Amino acid sequence: MNPGVFTWLFLLWLRSRTLAAATAERSNVLFIMSDDLRTSLGCYGDTLAKSPNIDQLASKSQVFLNAFAQQAVCAPSRTSMLTSRRPDTTRLYDFNSYWRVHAGNYTTLPQHFKSKGYYTMSVGKVFHPGIASNHTDDYPYSWSVPAYHPFSFRFEKQKMCKGEDGQLHANLLCAVNVTEQPGGTLPDLESTDEAVRLLKSRASDGAPFFLAVGFHKPHIPFRIPQEYLSLYPLDEMPLAPDPDVPKLLPPVAYNPWTDVRKREDVQKLNVSFPYGPIPKDFQRRIRQHYYAAVSYMDAQVGRLLSTLDALGLTDSTMVVFTSDHGWSLGEHGEWAKYSNFDVVTRVPLIMFVPGVTASYSSPGESTFPFIDVLTQPEYSFTNARVIQTTVELVDIFPTVSCMAGLPALEECPDVSFQVELCTAGRNLVDTFYQIERGMIPERIAFSQYPRPADTPQNNSDLPDLKDIKVMGYSMRNWIYRYTLWLGFDPRSFQVNLSDVHAGELYILSVDPEEDENVYKKLDHNMVTKKMASLPPDMSLQTRMRLQLHYHTAGLKTDRGKV
């Protein structure tokens, strides 16, 4: 036998033995999802962020540095992630349809675990509540018991923020004295209490569990305990490195952050629509409150993880931490999500697998001791288990299932509306057992975002399905982001490949902030001729891969050589 083949077979056998040992008793799963969290964490290199509990988790986990959402808005992203189908397959681009009725009866991640004997539970915002999850958070399909939502969330959009005039307002910036809030609590505090209660209730049960906990922060409004602002002195808050709208940004690509504009404190600024900048002093306050919200959420994660330790569950529980999408903090003159840029599509993805990413704990040893971020804000992240290769949120379903010892999912065909269980993602299990030897350029993440028109409108951020006229398809590898804004028919869900409204190409090696769009400098005639001979049924993703290859085949990546 060829020595190379023998070595490969031996490693494959060793991996299967290791995985079998790690999952001899099926792993519990604690699935934690934050809302609107970009990679503003210490473990992702953000030196401003105070996130010691998540950094501690990351130090004992596998950290995917370049994970991307499939659409940068809550319901479409969460539905895509939890079904492992892309938005064009869930046919959910807004908040107004339920995939089982509107697209296909797709099995979800928790439903798959439930079908294998797991007791599945949902706390907080996991599925997007409302129509998008059938007003039940997809119960009873996905959950063994009805989903829990914190009572105090009903006050989130009400006038709860004390202004300088002493009156209550519906503000963007809303740091509060928790004791003065209804019930003396806040949604994420309640969700953590409930999740801790559920963990205690399952600790002595023989059945494995899948507990999903969705935190609302750092989603706006920034209604958070006021003490977390002290971690981020206002005079030390930097502005975004690229606060201006890029000169060559197509108008269709711009997110006019309408939901932010609706808040009372922002309305008082009288900022012009759509491009008018927010005053710099208020920009700093937004950034301060966002980071404080991250630290507040980090404290809740710490409470959950320390509970695993206290109950003796750490060695039998896989922990997944991620977010539905990111959030712009002034980059490109934008705020909120609603675009295809890295700052809104790139998310944290951290997976702790006991016995694989970290050794089992010794008797009396605490794996995740709680760290009070208000008194110990710094944690030195040290971990060699980092994956730089591009991955996607649709990869979570097949990876978590496999790492927990469940059967591997089949890959979805190009058209999968009639297939209940399959994955549009990639099983990342190999990354846990092989040393990454550099970035893999072939790995690409796909995202998309709809628009109602070629120029910013009041509904550009979140158009209803019937109003979508243009779909921005974006692909991201380790060196490029390539986006095409194409005509879209919301009645047939068909994209017109010949109806190109605009394009973007960013060379990330010299333009990591995605400010210099070089799309208009490309040889489009040459690419059009090459694409003309392709089969008409070729998928959009494959077409875009080829276009990017043709466009960049002779492209220099040092500045000024395009």
Image (spheres, rainbow, N blue to C red):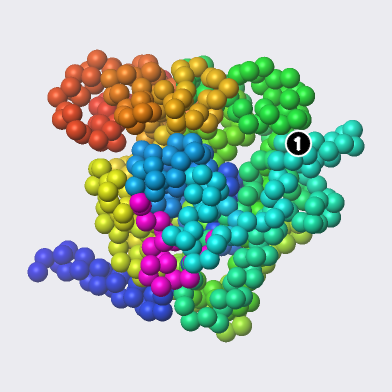
| Residue 385 visible in the current orientation | no
Q: How many numbered marks are there?
A: 1
Residue 48 drawn at (x, y percent):
66, 45
Residue 191 drawn at (x, y percent):
65, 59
Taking 557 as reference, is 332 left or right? Answer: right
Magenta-drawn stretch contains 537: no
| Mark 1 surroundings within 10 Å by alpha-carbon count, few (fewer than 14), some (14 through 19), many (20 or more) | many
Q: 83 or 131, which is in the foreground?
A: 131
- Residue ID for mark 1: 170
Taking 367 as reference, is 271 left or right? Answer: right
Q: Quadrant of the N terminus?
A: bottom left
Residue 380 versus residue 389 in the image, above or below: below
For image coordinates 58% across by 43% down, the residue present is 36
For image coordinates 41% across by 24% down, the residue present is 470
Occupied quadrant, residue 258: top right
Type of amino acid at the residue the image marks with label 1: Ala
Magenta-drawn stretch contains 115: yes
Give the structural element (helix, strand or loop) at label 1.
loop
| Residue 527 visible in the current orientation | yes
Residue lying at the far bottom in this picture: please name it: 363
Q: Which residues are magenta?
A: 105-122
Residue lying at the far left in this picture: please name it: 1
For image coordinates 60% across by 28% down, the residue present is 257
Q: Quadrant of the C terminus?
A: top left
Taking 48 as reference, is 119 left or right? Answer: left
